Image: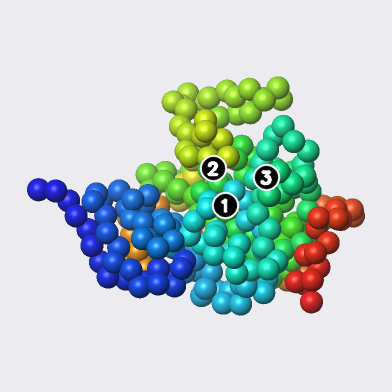
């Protein structure tokens, strides 16, 4: 018998009534909104966003590696102080490439306390030094700001973080006994290498890398089309009065417009 899933619901990415349909139990990437084409993790993040930051349209937002669909498209359309970045290794950091800011999440060029909100959707499994990424995001967030993100948390792993590959100074990769795994990359046809795996202990490990308060939310929410594996949304909040890990006194011209959102 052919598997078929169908449920009446509501998409929190595009605010429309939907009949969520799927022809397999691979819900994570195949249970798609017919209107905005969002997938499960994007709807999960959108739902958390609307609950904890209902005024998100007024905020200074940085999203790294957005897709052209779902909540990323909604953020770009509705938030005047939204800034999107991708990483283009062959170009100068901070430059604008094809309409995106060129940023390496491990070594960002933004000034301290530039954003109220940072968003990444399935990006953290592709970074080689998550400790540096969390410190950099903490630095670029204002006090009380949030980092909302998704990445696969392996249910069969207790270890917080296990590297799968190491990047050498010359740019080559050493794969640590793993068969290389690649995910879709919106700016590179070769895909994005999975550089690490995360397990149950990641919430505490994040707080050791940067002084965030951390909450992880897991779903089985048919009304909003958020079911299946890897539905977690990781919420990191920067405490008010927290000191950035390091300063960047220079503010690039392309960044000064963010001051308008700070009040």
Residue 236 appearing in the image: no
Residue 252 position, x and y percent, is: 85, 53
Q: Can you tell which of label 3 and label 1 is closer to the viewer?
A: 3
Classify mark 2: helix, strand or loop: loop
**Is 235 above or below relative to 3?**
below
Q: Is residue 243 left or right of residue 13?
A: right
Judged left or right of residue 45, residue 245 is: right
- Residue 169 higher or lower than 223, as above or below: above
- Compare residues 252 and 68 and report the one nearer the observer: 68
Q: Which dot marks residue 66?
A: 1
- Alpha carbon distance from label 3 to label 2: 12 Å
Q: Is residue 77 left or right of residue 38?
A: right
> In the rendering, at what x and y percent does residue 146 appear?
63, 65
The local crowd at label 2, few if under 14, some if 14 to 19, many if 20 or more residues have their Cα within 10 Å, is some
Question: Who comes first in sequence, dot 3 or dot 2?
Answer: 3
Query: Taking 90 as reference, is 66 left or right?
Result: left
Indicate whether 108 appears above or below 63.
above
Residue 248, position as x, y percentages in the image: 86, 52
Residue bearing the label numbered 2: 186
> Can residue 104 be spotted in the picture?
yes
Task: Name the N-terminal-most of marks 2 and 1.
Answer: 1
Name the residue: 86% across, 55% down: 253
Mark 1 surroundings within 10 Å by alpha-carbon count, few (fewer than 14), some (14 through 19), many (20 or more): many
**Residue that lies at the very extreme toward the left in this rendered image:** 1
Residue behind mark 3: 98
Residues tagged 2 and 1 counted as in contact (Cβ below 8 A) = yes
């Amino acid at each position: 018998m052919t598997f078929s899933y169908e449920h009446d619901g509501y998409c929190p990415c595009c605010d429309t009534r939907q009949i969520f349909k799927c022809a397999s139990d691979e819900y994570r990437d195949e249970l798609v909104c017919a209107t905005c084409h969002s997938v499960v993790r994007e709807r999960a993040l959108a739902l958390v966003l609307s609950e904890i930051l209902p005024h998100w349209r007024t905020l200074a937002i940085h999203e790294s590696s957005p897709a052209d669909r779902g909540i990323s498209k909604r953020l770009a359309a509705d938030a005047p102080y939204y800034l999107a970045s991708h990483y283009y290794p062959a170009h100068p950091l901070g430059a604008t490439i094809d309409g995106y800011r060129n940023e390496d999440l491990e070594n960002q060029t933004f000034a301290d306390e530039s954003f109220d909100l940072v968003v990444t959707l399935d990006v953290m499994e592709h970074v080689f030094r998550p400790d540096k990424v969390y410190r950099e995001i903490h630095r670029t967030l204002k006090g009380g700001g949030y980092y909302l993100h998704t990445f696969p948390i392996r249910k069969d792993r207790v270890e917080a973080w296990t590297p799968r590959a190491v990047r050498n100074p010359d740019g080559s990769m050493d794969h640590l006994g793993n068969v290389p795994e690649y995910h879709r990359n919106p700016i590179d046809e070769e895909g994005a290498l999975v550089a690490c795996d995360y397990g149950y202990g990641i919430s505490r490990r994040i707080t050791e890398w940067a002084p965030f308060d951390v909450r992880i939310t897991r779903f089985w929410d048919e009304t909003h089309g958020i079911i299946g594996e890897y539905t977690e949304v990781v919420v990191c909040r920067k405490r008010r009065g927290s000191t950035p890990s390091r300063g960047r006194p220079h503010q690039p011209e392309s960044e000064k417009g963010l001051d308008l959102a700070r009040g």
